[in-house]
Amino acid sequence: MRAGWKLLAAAAIAASGWAGADGPHFATGIRIGETTAHSAIVWTRLTRDAEHVPFGGPMPDVRYKDKSGEWIDEVKDRDPRMTPVVSFPGIDASGPTEAVQQLEGAAPGTEGEVRVRYRVEGAAEWTDTEWAAVDPARDFTKQFPLEGLESGATYELTVESRTPEGNPGDTVEGGFHTAPEADAETPVNFVVTTCYAYPDRDAPDGFKIYDQILKLNPDFFVHTGDILYYDKLAKSIDLARWHWQRMYSMPTNVRFHRQVGSYFMKDDHDTWVNDCWPGMESTFMGNFTFEQGQAVFLEQVPMGDSTYRTVRWGKDLQIWMVEGRDFRSPNTMKDGPEKSIWGAEQMAWFKRTVAESEATFRVLISPTPVVGPDRPTKNDNHANRGFAHEGREIREFMATQPNLFSICGDRHWQYVSHAADTGTLEFACGPASNEHAGGWKPEDRRPEHTYMNVTGGFLALDVARDDEGPRLRARHYSVDGEVLHEEVLRPE
C-alpha cells in the first residue's frame, strides 16, 4: 500500500464533508473516476440545498393498470404488459418535477459554476481548471477531464462553486491516486463491489462498507453495476435521477467518493429494468426508456469515451471492465454463435488487448458472472444456458491466457469458483449489505466452489512482490471489515 492522500475518518469530519457559504452546494458530493497514469475525471453536481431531504420523507406511490385500463390489485413481477400510474401522496406541488424534489433523499440541482484545483500532494502550486457552468439538461452536472498528471502519484484537489453572478459557494476537498507506469514494480490494492439497494442500507448514514473500505486506503475502487435499482419507482427520467440523488447524498457515500478514484460499470437495474436489453418492449417503466437510462448513467458517473475499457496499474496488474447491456442480443433469442452479450466489436477488443498485455496478473471485471455456477432459473449471463455459447467462448479463451481470471458482480452472495469445463477462476464480490444478500442456499456448496458465503461485504485485492516474486491476494470481507476468506495467487 502506498502512503498517500490522508484519508478522512468518519469521526473526524462533518458528515457532509464540505465547507462553504449560502450555496450553491454539493449535497451529492463529487466523484473521481477513470484514473490512469496521467489522467482522471472529476464529476461535480451543484445542489440547491446543503443536504438531501431527510430519511423518513415522502415517497412516491406506484400502482398499475393492465392493457384494458383496469387497475391491477395483484402485481406480477415486472410484467411488461402493465402500465404504471405514479402519485405523490402528501406532497403539494405544481407538477411531477416539483414533487420529485420533495421526496425522501432528493437533492434538487441548481445553476452555478464550478472549477477544480489540484496538485500532487504537498506541492507548492495548484493547477486550476477554468470555471464552467453546470448543465441543467444533464441534472446540473459537469465533468472535468484532468490531463498531464504524474504517474504513481497522490493528488489532492478542491472543487469550488459559485453562483451564476460569481458569488462564492461551497467547496469540497478530496484526493486520489494515479496509476504507476506499466514497468513500475509497485504494490497496488483495490476493492470491487456490487448491488446497492437503497432500502437495504445498513447504517444510519448509508452503508457500513464504505468506512471499512477507507481503512484499506485503496488505490482505486470498482463498482460492477446495480449501483441502484430503478425497477419499482423510476417511472420517469426525473424519478431515475432521484434514485442517484438519494443514493449519493448519503454521508457514507459522499465522504468515500471524494477520497477514492473509482471506475463505474452498469448492469440491468441501473440501465433500465431487470434483465433488460436494447429494443426490449415493455410498458412497465412508464415514460422512462432504455435509451434514457443509458444517457442518465453517463450523466451521473465520471466516464470517458467508452463504457468498456482496460487500465494498466504497474508491471503486475491490468484490469478489463466490460459493457454488458448496450450491445446484447435479446435474452429471448435462441442461443448460438449469433447471440451475444458483449457484441462482436467488444469481444474482438477483449481478446486482442488481453493477448497484447504483458501485465503479470490480468483481471476481467464483469457486471455478471462468466463462470458461476448460477441459479438454473436465470437466463441473463454467461453462466446461464441462454448465453452458453458465448460464455464457453470466453472461458475457453481465458483458459489459454496465463494468470487471467474474472471478478463478477450481480450475484447476491460471495464465492470463489473454477469453471467445470475450462477451470477458469472467478471471484464474486457479493452485495453491499447483509440485508441484500440472498438468492443462493447457504448449504448448496458445489464442486466448483472453493468458497461460498451468502453474505454482504466486498472483495479487496492487492498485488505486491515478496521473496518469491509477484503475488496477488484476494480477500472477501464482511460489512464490518472482517476477513472471511483469502486466496493467494502466484504467476504460472
Image (cartoon, rainbow, N blue to C red):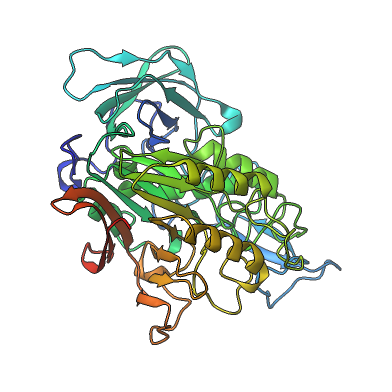
Across and down, in percent, residue 187 comes to 22, 43
Quadrant of image for the C terminus: bottom left
Q: Is residue 345 above or below residue 392?
A: above
Q: Quadrant of residue 40?
A: top left
Relative to the observer, which residue lies in front, 352 or 1?
Answer: 352
Across and down, in percent, residue 410 comes to 49, 63
Q: Is residue 181 above or below residue 321?
A: above
Relative to the observer, which residue lies in front, 46 or 460?
Answer: 460
Farthest-out residue, right = 68
Q: Quadrant of residue 476?
A: bottom left
Across and down, in percent, residue 483 comes to 22, 66
Q: Is residue 299 left or right of residue 116?
A: right
Across and down, in percent, residue 60 comes to 57, 57
Q: Is residue 186 above or below residue 489?
A: above
Residue 381 appears in the rendering: no
Residue 352 appears in the rendering: yes
Farthest-out residue, left = 467
Quadrant of image for the N terminus: top left
What is the count of numbered marks? 0
Relative to the observer, which residue lies in front, 194 or 485?
Answer: 485
